[in-house]
Image (cartoon, rainbow, N blue to C red):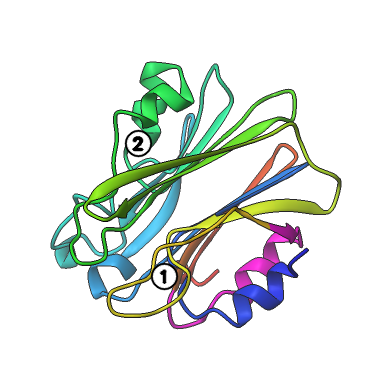
Amino acid sequence: MTDFLDFLRSNAYPGRGIAVGRDRVYYFIMGRSANSRNRVFERTPDGIRTRAYDERALTDPSLIIYHPVRESEQGLIVTNGDQTDTIRDMGDFRKALMTRTYEPDEPNWTPRISALCRPDGSFELSILKHKHGRCLREFFCYEGCDEGRGYFLSTYQGDGSPLPSFAGEPLEITMPEPEEVWAALNGENKVSLYAKVGDTVKLFNKHLGD
């Protein structure tokens, strides 16, 4: 099992990441460009959305403004893009993601990562990534996990040019407290963190001084 805090401290740029545990869910975004960093999380009636911190500096909203988290009849949906709405609207996690592909941001071809956390404690993780000019869709289904443990999926393995896509199965990780996760993320690249522990949601936004 990987110590999640050590992993984050030693990885300057995993990009966007989802961690799902027995009683908690984390989703964070990081950024290297000014446009990616110009964001905050804010609450909505059914979850959260991203918005530009400085609307005047927003240059391209297409891949950075979306609803990362939505409550639905299926459960809690968490993703790194507008596939959140596809999953909610279609009502079937796998079928919805079979209609989607990686992001069109050549040469990185950023993967789309997604999670569905069901009320019974089971959950699914998915990554859609570029491989040899085609989309590789991977799905990982879990009946649940033990207290203090979780599974983590990110868009990238680390920094690079082009950015290397996450590879392999989701990491089995420790599940520390939200404040510890926020502190462990790279100070230059971190942007925002969503943390749901039990029924309590906390948002951390670098631009807002959290």
Quadrant into which the N terminus falls? bottom right
Q: Amino acid at mark 2?
A: Gln
Q: Residue visible at 40% across and 34% down?
A: 84
Answer whether residue 188 is visible to the viewer in this image.
yes
Q: Position of residue 106 (x, y in %)?
A: 18, 62
Q: Position of residue 72 (x, y in %)?
A: 51, 22
**Mark toward the viewer: 1 or 2:** 2
Task: Say if 18 sits above or below 143 in the image.
Answer: below
Task: Say if 205 sits above or below 81 in the image.
Answer: below
Mark number, residue 127: none
* Residue 4 is one of the magenta-drawn residues: no
Task: Say if 71 sits above or below 125 in the image.
Answer: above
Q: CA distance from mark 1 to mark 2?
A: 26 Å
Residue interval drawn in magenta = 172-189
* Residue 188 is one of the magenta-drawn residues: yes
Q: Position of residue 128 (x, y in %)?
A: 38, 45
Residue tagged by mark 1?
Answer: 207
Q: Residue visible at 85% across and 45% down?
A: 146
Q: Secondary structure at mark 2?
A: helix
Residue 168 relative to residue 143: left or right: left
Q: Which of these two is toward me, 16 or 153? A: 153
Q: Which of these two is toward me, 14 or 28? A: 14
Q: Residue visible at 65% across and 26% down?
A: 118
Q: Amino acid at mark 1?
A: His
Quadrant into which the C terminus falls? bottom right
Residue tagged by mark 2?
Answer: 83
Q: Earlier in the sequence, mark 1 or mark 2?
A: 2
- Occupied quadrant, residue 7: bottom right
The residue positioned farthest toward the front in the image shown = 132
